[in-house]
Image (cartoon, grey):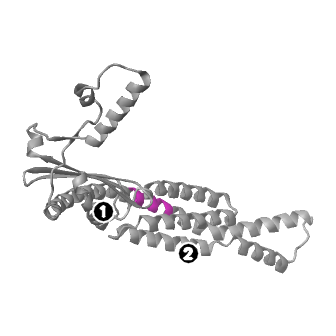
Amino acid sequence: MIRSMTGYGRAEALLDGRKWTIEIKSLNHRYTEIFVRMPAALLALEGEVKRKVGERLTRGRVEVVIRIESEAAQEGEMRFDLNLPLLRHYHSLLLQLKETLNLKDDISLGMLAGLKDAFIAKEAEVDLDGAWKGMEAVLEEALSALTEMRKKEGEIIFRDMLMRVDLIKKGLDIIEGRAPKVVEEYHKKLAERVKELTGGVEIDAARLSQEVAIMADRMDITEEVVRFRSHLNQLDEMLAGEEAAGRKIDFLYQEMNREVNTMGSKGNDAEISCRVVEIKSELSRMREQVQNIE
């Protein structure tokens, strides 16, 4: 069953006195892109997170947000550190400003303490091996929630595409049935036109048949119809399969569009042209859906 690339998953757990929350959001994208936002203390695990996500999701732009809240933070006892490098830089700039403008004001503690980012939240120390064991389970839960949502969205797309494939097949049946009649009508019209131009004089039947045969060969769309049906059979298999097939279906769409364009140009018939337009319209709507398939 096909899956959508759009989804959201969230999971949380209490591990060693800390509340872990992982949120995953996925959006449409031609390829696979994974972005991770996590506390600096966990950056060494970013590669593991991306690997785990890549094992479950094969296409789309995926954003993973990992947050940790310690018990102290939950109780309003969040710890902070001085951002000494930044404060020293602030102090140097203030001294430069004082000298340049010949100011008499003193640089006070209150002045420095009120500057932006003077204090920074103290990162909790994390045992990376232990953290990964706990985080992996939370990540797996969030991924399962995301996958379930993508699956439900995919079911909606699946039903819509089946309906459109059915309409396309009906249009193709009409085109295939109409093609031989077009040649017959051309034969009849050509004979009438030649008779009209020659004033009713009997014409060479062999010559007329030869001209009709040449035109019939030019108008023959058998190969295009056969290839188009083959593509539809492949599409049916991909839609019913378990593997991610978004890219393959997108390629099939391009091939089907090429074949139906050729049918329209070779068919030389109003009825065929009308059905070609209808099929192309359904293909266009299908492609919009394909852009959201994993």
> Residue at (41%, 59%) from the top-left corner?
161
Q: Is residue 9 visible?
A: no
* CB contact under 8 Å: marks 1 and 2: no
Using the image, tell me which numbered label, if any, was put on residue 50: 1
Nearest to the observer: residue 13 or residue 91: 91
Nearest to the observer: residue 169 or residue 152: 152
Q: Secondary structure at mark 1?
A: helix
Residue pointed to by mark 2? 226
> Residue at (45%, 68%) from the top-left corner?
248
Nearest to the observer: residue 120 or residue 129: 120
The furthest residue to the bottom: 206
Q: Is residue 44 visible?
A: yes
Amino acid carrying mark 2 in the image: Val
Query: Magenta residues, as a range?
Result: 160-168
Q: Is residue 287 left or right of residue 74?
A: right
Give the x, y percent position of residue 71: 8, 45
Q: Secondary structure at mark 2?
A: helix
Amino acid carrying mark 1 in the image: Lys
